[in-house]
Image (tube, helix red, strand yellow):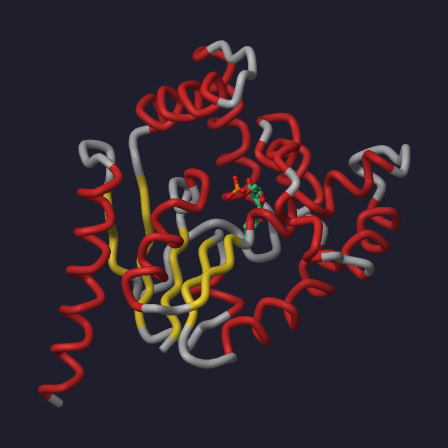
Amino acid sequence: MIIAIDGPAASGKGTLGKRLAHHYHFRHLDTGVIYRAVAKAVLDDGAAIDDETAALAAAMELDPEKFGDPVLKTQGIGDAASVVSAFPRVREALVSFQRQFAAEPPGAVLDGRDIGTVICPDADVKIFVVADPVVRARRRTLEARARGEDADEALVLADILKRDERDRNRPVAPLKPASDAHLLDNSHLDIEGGVRAAIAIVEAVRAGRQRV
Ligand code: C5P
């Protein structure tokens, strides 16, 4: 079974996907980390973040061992990730890694922006997670401060809006719900509430399938 979690509010540190995967004993991949790792590799090489050739080289040399680097979680790297992720050849180079991950038993939860539309269009359950940008800015600011970063909520909000806009309007794999995705608005839900709502969606889809 493959569960695709997409949407502007899909990741939030990967918590929802991680929790869902834990609940079902599935494997979990926060695909935002992949684009973040590519962005960091480009910057580490001293290349400009909009250097497509450097980004493609970094994507082809992707090293999952580095996915745990705490620097990947920072706002700056997230912003840089949204630049490299708009390059079609970079996205293409990362497709097979994600599909292979999804295909391995016993099942997988992948979260990102294009899992239900491009990476796993046949996913068993697709959830599109949204939240009020003001609420997301508040959460990201608190997360950043908890990591010891200096975060200004107004700047975080501006960054979120800019990044969403870039993700929505790119020509390849834009951020949009798959036609068969279930919408989950977690603006007024805490982490537990979001996880419960996601499990309820998965169970409803499973129950519906058994009836057929
Ligand atoms: O989800 P996260 O904030 O870690 O993602 C960082 C950036 O990576 C996003 O803003 C988006 O541009 C890009 N991304 C993507 N496709 C995915 C996951 C992330 O384009 N599947």
Residue at horizontal 38 percent and vertical 57 percent from the top: 5
The image quarter containing residue 135 is top left
Left or right, residue 101 beside residue 21: right
Q: What count of labels does the image hold?
A: 0
Residue nearest the observer in this picture, 15 or 96 = 15
| Image x and y of residue 66, in percent | 70, 49
In percent of width and height, residue 160 lies at 48, 27
Identified at 59% across, 76% down, the residue is 100
* Residue at the spot 31% in from the left edge and 58% down from the top edge: 20
Seen in the picture, residue 138 relative to 129 is either above or below; the reply is: above
Q: Residue at x 85, y 41 (%)?
A: 51
Query: Is residue 201 rendered to the left or right of residue 29?
Result: left
Instruction: Quadrant for the C terminus, please.
Output: bottom left
Out of 191 and 188, give the one closest to the viewer: 191
Left or right: 8 in relation to 199: right
- The front one of 156 and 66 is 66
Residue at the far left in the pictured view? 211
Q: Is residue 102 above or below residue 154?
A: below
Q: Judge left or right: residue 58 versus residue 118.
A: right
Residue lying at the far bottom in this picture: please name it.
Answer: 212
Looking at the image, residue 208 lies above or below residue 134: below
List x then y, in percent, for residue 44. 84, 35
Q: Quadrant of ligand 1?
A: top right
Instruction: Indicate whether 65 appears above or below 159.
Output: below
Q: Quadrant of the N terminus?
A: bottom left
